[in-house]
Image: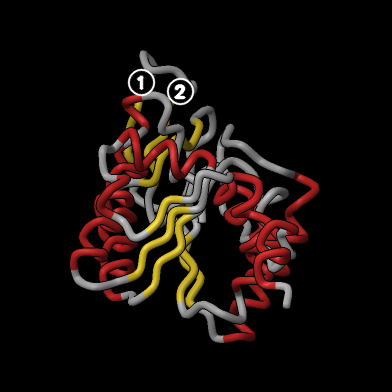
Amino acid sequence: MGGAKISGKIDVINNLLPKVDVLLIGGGMSYTFFKAKGIPIGNSLLEEDRIPVAKEVLEQAEKKGVELLLPVDNVVATAVDESAETKVTDGPEVPEGWVGVDIGPKTVDLYREKILQAKTVVWNGPMGVFEKEPFARGTFAIAQALAEATEKGAVTIVGGGDSAAAIRKAGLADRVSHVSTGGGASLEFLAGLTLPGVAALTDK
């Protein structure tokens, strides 16, 4: 689960928590989770008003026995700009004056390992600012891991919007089980809401 903000994904996360064994968090939303845990995030994206929500998700995951993983390292930059200076952090902390722009290589390895162990994978939201080439590696590595998991027999679903754009940009859209073209609709479906079109098809 990635993307910029928790606010658009909180219903999805709450709906998935009772159903998943592992929840991997990346992208801009991870910094609100870090802040909820008291980890410094520098100048990274933060939804201040969602910190209590992030804390609640962390508590619920623990109660339900869900392995909720946050990045163990980050690619950080002096600005969200392709010409900006970048470096990889040793741990999850983002130094003052720096912005988190992607998951780091240790996180890629960890998340890849978890994806390859899974029989079903649902991916929604990029791991970083993938629209800018220097910050796309993490997102493309996750796309590659999904393709490899599919080859091993896993069912892999990419849920619309930015994730669909990312897997296409990585050239791997035809190597996963399903790519949803409906960004908002796929989020609503994952959040457990009824989609009128689907309800009409299943209504007897």
Give the side of residue 177 with respect to residue 195, left or right: left
Task: Tell me the tag on residue 78.
Answer: 2
Residue shown at the point (74%, 65%) measured from the top left: 194
Residue at the image position 72 percent from the left and 49 percent from the top: 7
Q: Amino acid at mark 2?
A: Thr
Mark 1–mark 2 CB contact (< 8 Å): yes
Secondary structure beneath label 2: loop
Query: CA gap, disc 1 to disc 2?
Result: 6 Å
Q: Is residue 85 above or below residue 140?
A: above
143 lies left or right of 32: left
Residue 169 vertical placement versus 124 (above, below): above
The chosen color scheme is secondary structure
Pinpoint residue 36: horizontal percent, then vertical percent.
Answer: 66, 58
Residue on which disc 1 sits: 85
The residue shown at (69%, 68%) is: 192
How far across and how far down the image is residue 49, in percent? 80, 48
Q: Position of residue 114 (x, y in %)?
A: 32, 70
Q: Residue at x 37, y 63 (%)?
A: 156
Q: Position of residue 102 (x, y in %)?
A: 41, 40
User: Under tag 1, what secondary structure?
Assistant: loop
